[in-house]
Image (tube, coloured by chain):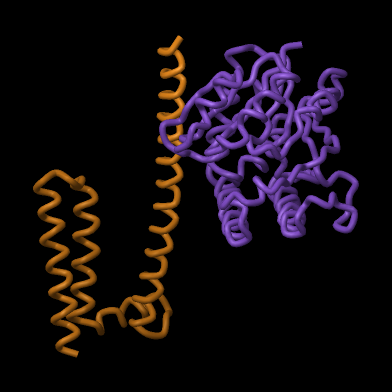
Chain colours: A orange, B purple
């Protein structure tokens, strides 16, 4: 169990360092940085104090703390799949528009 | 009557000359939109007398047809016909395809390979898997967009100037065929189907994208994209 905690905390630490680096290099917005920082700090808290999820589980009327973590993780993963699918679709449309304009411009230049 | 034929093409150098020449017999202008071909499709089509517009990368059938429609608007045609580049459609079907437009009975006409034909009555050249794929696609098109058709995947279509102005294609890939029906419904256009004969030659059947596995995976992808279009504007 201690090994699991140590590995997980190390993993979270690496992510936090990378996150700070991204903020420093202006590769991420401050709002996004704060959201991710909050998310990983919560994850770290749950790793150190797993029983803390029991309070939330009790509050939400879910049996065990571990179940709360699973439910929330699934909801977050599904949200991101949806978010990226939509983003990809938007990017697809933009690429098509650029390519189309280039083809029209090339034809115009030829004449 | 000013008729413009749009042919979306991707790596069709073996047959494009023949297709363009046949289309020229039935139209005032042939526009080939070369969807980033890696062979000589564009060059050969140009030699055969088509006007060429070239995508610098391969985008997919939907985006290519959308480019074709956008280009066609510049020429102010009375009728626009879309047809496949792989020789699957006969240019001699164009007069009967555009007849409902000329007599003002319809705004959008689809050449159907399956009109009035059950599975056992289908043309001998139509592979069984294609018949089932189309049947399922028709059902899906009806379920999503509420429009009945016998050939939702047909690439041979004719539009009058009203349909050309109203139809706004957003899909990038194969789902464009069903999207045309969605646009017909949303814009209250009059639809008519006329029977045509699909030609499944050795050439078109040997194309890698028509392999059985590819067909199934392409089909699944098409249905997913259609769902996406239904719910995302």
Across and down, in percent, residue A53 comes to 29, 79
At 68% from the left and 32% from the top, the residue drawn is: B83
At 21% from the left and 79% from the top, the residue drawn is: A47
B154 is higher (above) or lower (below) than B216 = above
B211 is higher (above) or lower (below) than B100 = below
Across and down, in percent, residue B103 comes to 87, 18
At 89% from the left and 50% from the top, the residue drawn is: B117
Horizontal placement of B110 versus A67: left or right?
Answer: right
Query: Residue B180's quadrant in the figure?
Result: top right
Horizontal placement of B23 versus B63: left or right?
Answer: right
Query: Residue B171's quadrant in the figure?
Result: top right
Q: Is residue A91 visible?
A: yes
Camera-side residue: A55 or B128?
B128
Camera-side residue: A58 or A76?
A76
Across and down, in percent, residue B121 comes to 90, 53
Horizontal placement of A80 versus B91: left or right?
Answer: left
Q: Quadrant of the N terminus of chain B?
A: top right
B219 is higher (above) or lower (below) than A70 = above
Query: Residue B69's quadrant in the figure?
Result: top right
Horizontal placement of B75 versus A1: left or right?
Answer: right
Camera-side residue: B131 or A9?
B131
């Amino acid at each position: 169990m201690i090994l699991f905690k140590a590995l997980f905390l190390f993993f979270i630490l690496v992510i936090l360092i990378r996150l700070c680096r991204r903020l420093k290099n202006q590769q991420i917005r401050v709002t996004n940085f704060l959201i991710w920082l909050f998310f990983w700090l919560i994850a770290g808290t749950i790793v150190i104090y797993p029983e803390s999820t029991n309070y939330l589980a009790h509050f939400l009327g879910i049996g065990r703390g571990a179940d709360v973590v699973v439910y929330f993780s699934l909801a977050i993963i599904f949200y991101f799949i949806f978010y990226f699918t939509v983003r990809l679709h938007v990017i697809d449309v933009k690429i098509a528009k650029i390519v189309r304009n280039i083809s029209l411009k090339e034809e115009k230049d030829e004449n | 009557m000013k008729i413009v034929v749009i042919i979306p093409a991707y790596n069709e150098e073996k047959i494009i000359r023949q297709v363009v020449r046949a289309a020229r017999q039935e139209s005032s202008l042939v526009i080939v939109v070369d969807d980033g071909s890696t062979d000589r499709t564009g060059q050969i089509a140009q030699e055969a007398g088509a006007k060429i517009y070239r995508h610098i990368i391969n985008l997919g059938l939907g985006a290519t047809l959308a480019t074709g429609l956008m280009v066609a608007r510049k020429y102010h045609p009375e009728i626009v016909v879309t047809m496949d580049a792989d020789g699957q459609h006969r240019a001699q079907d164009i007069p009967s395809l555009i007849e409902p437009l000329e007599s003002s009975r319809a705004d959008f006409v689809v050449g159907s390979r399956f009109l009035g034909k059950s599975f056992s009555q289908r043309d001998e050249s139509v592979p069984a898997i294609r018949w089932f794929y189309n049947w399922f696609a028709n059902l899906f098109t009806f379920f999503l967009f509420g429009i009945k058709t016998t050939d939702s995947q047909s690439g041979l279509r004719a539009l009058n100037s009203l349909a050309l102005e109203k139809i706004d294609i957003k899909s990038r890939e194969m789902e464009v065929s069903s999207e045309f029906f969605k646009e017909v419904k949303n814009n209250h256009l009059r639809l008519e189907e006329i029977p045509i004969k699909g030609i499944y030659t050795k050439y078109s059947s040997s194309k890698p994208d028509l392999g059985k596995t590819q067909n199934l995976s392409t089909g699944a992808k098409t249905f997913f994209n259609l769902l996406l279009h239904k719910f995302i504007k």
